[in-house]
Image (cartoon, rainbow, N blue to C red):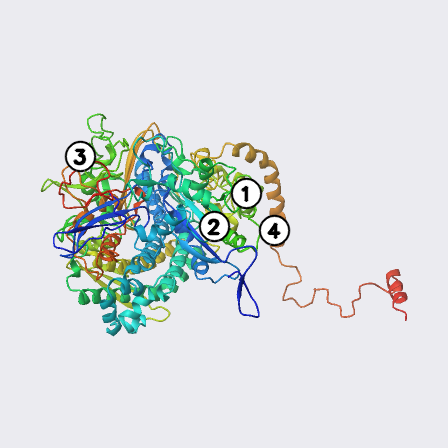
Amino acid sequence: MTATKPKPAGQQPGELVEMAWDPITRIIGNLGVYTKIDFANRVVAECHTTSSLFRGYSVFMKGKDPRDAGFITSRICGICGDNHTTCSVYAQNMAYGIKTPPLAEWIINLGEAAEYMFDHTLFQDNLVFVDFCEAMVKQTNPSVLARAEKTAAPGRDIHGYRTIADIMRAYNPFEGEVYKEALKVSRTTREMFCLMEGRHVHPSTVYPGGVGTMPQPSLFTDYLSRLISILDFVKKAVAMNDDIFDFWYEALPGYEEVGRRRVLLGCWGAFQNPDVVDYRYETMTNWGRAMHVTPGIVVDGKLLTTDLVDINLGIRILLGSSYYKDWVGEEDPFVSHDPLGNPVDIRHPWNQTTLPDPGKRDFGDKYSWVMSPRWFDKSTGDHLALDTGGGCFARLYTTALAKMVDTPYVKSTGTSVLITLPKSQRLPETTLEWKIPRWSNALERDRSRAYFIAYAAAMSLYFLEQAMERVRGGDMRVFAEFDVPDEAIGCGFHEAVRGTLSHHLVIRDRKIANYHPYPPTPWNGSPRDSYGTPGPYEDAIQNMPIFEENGPDKFKGVDIMRAVRSFDPCLPCGVHMYVGGGRTLKKIHSPMFGASHG
Amino acid sequence: MTQNMRDTGAVIPQEHGFDEVTILWISEGMSCDGDSVSMTASGQPAIEDIVLGLIPGLPKVNLHNKVLSPAAGGEEFLAPYRRAARGEMAEPFILVIEGSVPNENINGDGYWTSFGNDENTGEPLTLNWWIDQLAPKAWAVVAAGTCATYGGIHAMAGNPTGCMGLADYLGWDFRSQGGLPIVNVPGCPIQPENFMETLTWVLYHAAGSAPPPPLDHMLRPQWLFGKTVHEGCDRAAYYEQADFAKDYNSPKCQVKIGCWGPVINCNVPKRGWMGGVGGCPNVGGICIGCTMPGFPDKFMPFMDMPPGGSLSTLLIKPYGAMIRRLRGITNGTANREPKWHHNGPELTSGYNPRWRPYGPADPRRQAAIERNKP
């Protein structure tokens, strides 16, 4: 099933050409995309995407000291490991009954805000935008580039580029102005991160119970001065993104279909509010809603819930196409009821047992190292394959609809999010408005990333003010003592950079009895589950039109890459999936698409 | 560029060293790609400085790294790796491995991690296959991060994949085509500047302008890993005064609350994490030994005092308490201004415009007069 070398194929109607990209570059982790393309109709007829990595965190964490979980789970991901540490700390705080000192919450929020600013910038400008840069478009869509040369950029006064093509040139890898500036900005924001959490990407100063960061006034000075230095860049980036994506819709009518899927979004909330959060499960509904990014589930544009208890109880881990044996029926549940007395399903992460069963890669059978997380909708009985829209899209969407965030810098209106950034070196005070778009597609996922960088920057100003107020008032406490109980359960909900992240922990005899982290990529890139429900990538790429001007001989697959990268795939959590129309392929033997397979 | 401009204008390569080097970076070990990401954090030097040829005396560098590759992916990206595996790469290459090396002998027909597919069969190619093909042909082999150097997190007790470090897999006596042992840069993840500095040294060596980097018995750069965390930590003075933090609110030495700094080879507290910012115990994060071959198992549970800590902290108590008290007295003195700083009616500073270092009767004065006679 390699299709590594495209076979000479005509473009006759009904003739499919195999195309494959394995590994996919400019993402974290290993992902391969295997497609069959109908060049006559300019559509992706079929697609499998696979990732191949199993490390077994939930296996080797068993029996370890639960306080080590934050240090260990950080190592799941090399770009957003701190999101895991934070999420693990949230889950441990619940298990140990900790109420973190407020200053520690502001410090963690500042660290996480810096992580969003860093990660989204590096991903968007140095990885995603290579697909939209002049060097790439010259090879894939010369006519679009010619048009871009003649199209004036509406945001010229903000970003300084005269034409759309000038913006595209600024993103050329290693040579473009913005590409190089983004690398530097991603270092400044990482320094901000290191101020709060010690080191990037595996934090040193984040503990259950708080942080070890020394809350000296200089800490906040050092953060603030760096933040001020990047605000021009943040404002310019939004204008450049808007110009590029608006132009794309215009230059390539129908581009809204690239990577488009039904609006099925999940966001688990970010940035705790220390005035409300006490980490008790019994009060989770309230403190979840008090977060500075609102948790929620959106189905077809409607907000289904903002209640973390609902969200938690609805999580189901299904099998179907993955290299595991089923645990159901052979193990007793660890958690039969949650602390509120609600029954907990045997397929909930609390009750999961990971039984790895490696085998050959066979797209007709098993080909995945990841299970299929789904959210069970009680009202319809559906197991929903939620996606995160690359994280920022779902975060802005749920926050906009829920109308719960109201700070001096960021306000939710019920239909949009208003983000106000103060005056910076070159540009005046700016209020940006992210409005809920018509589609959940590649361009809108990418666009929301630039807006969410602004959201995180604006929020960090608010967090700084709150933190400095505490320090000036003499409150320097950042850590609360605790004891590890003999038996406990905990869950943590957070937003990793690319979306929903939850950690589920069971303690027995002061040791980890069960620990399951659910990062965003399994949600986004899950294989077909046991009910046959396709994962989000499947919707997004299945029947997607292609706009690239190259025929099969020189085909780069840039539209498919844009669709995949818009989800911000981050594969170290080991994803492996099947994306396709569900048509049963004739099973000869594995591999199915060998070089001789027509 | 390593080249001599002669009067003729001809470019003549140096006798020793290369004008062009390719870096083949594979992060498909059991990894989180954190070392690739960390590498991009370095500004000392920055990866783009090396790729753009801004550092004098380095060869032209072709970097192939999945995270930063401008290629869409797949064969376009794999081409140089395939070329090198076939032995057809014209220029010397440096192989960088990121991630633990799994044991692929224990999973039947399955695989733990793969990097591209076999061109003929379509089966996933394992990391181990690539190492077998590329390491013997590589001019130099570099292991980036604790996973690749010593196994790291994924090789902890109870792991299902049988992970190990690169030297465990290739043999500790492995030598590359350039005659170098594996160059290990541990760290979870690598400290950005430590890695880039080591890579730059290897590149200077490739250019013929530097000897091989000096490595210790665990194949680590000596100048980076020759001292302990404690020796570079600005909280170490608290240890000397037997003044220990009891919890993480404290700015004092963390050895009683989980810090392994006194016995860990690493320069992070001295160097900071990036651009001098951040770090571990210097900024309140216990050292969990992430650069060490024994990581993580020998340092768990991380938040408890290391076993050796109780004796050493007990022994230093009487000395430290006394020193702290004596220093307290001296510090009190140092905190007082001299007594002639006042706004009184008289000057008491000892002012005397006719002051000389010694009086007329002093034999030293006579000697000076004798010395100065013409």
Categorize mark 1 by other alpha carbons within 10 Å: few (<14), some (14-19), many (20+).
many
Q: Earlier in the sequence, mark 4 or mark 2?
A: 2
Categorize mark 2 by other alpha carbons within 10 Å: few (<14), some (14-19), many (20+).
many
The residue closer to the viewer here, B105 or B361, is B105
The residue closer to the viewer here, B232 or A322, is A322
Q: Secondary structure at mark 2?
A: helix
- Give the alpha-carbon distance from disc 1 to disc 4, as whole Å: 32 Å
Asked whether the beta carbons under mark 3 and mark 1 sit within 8 Å of each other, the answer is no
Q: Are marks 4 and 2 on the same chain?
A: yes
| Labels 1, 4: front one | 1
Asked whether the beta carbons under mark 3 and mark 4 sit within 8 Å of each other, the answer is no
**Left or right of residue A75, residue A269 in this image:** left
Whole-percent x, y for residue A232 in the image: 34, 67
| Labels 2, 1: front one | 2
Q: Are marks 1 and 4 on the same chain?
A: yes
Report which residue position mark 1 lands on.
B228
Report which residue position mark 3 lands on.
A342
Q: The disc labelled 4 sits on which kind of residue?
A: Gly
Report which residue position mark 4 lands on.
B332
Which quadrant, please, contains the C terminus of chain A?
Answer: top left
- Give the alpha-carbon distance from disc 3 to disc 4, as whole Å: 63 Å
Q: Earlier in the sequence, mark 2 or mark 1?
A: 2
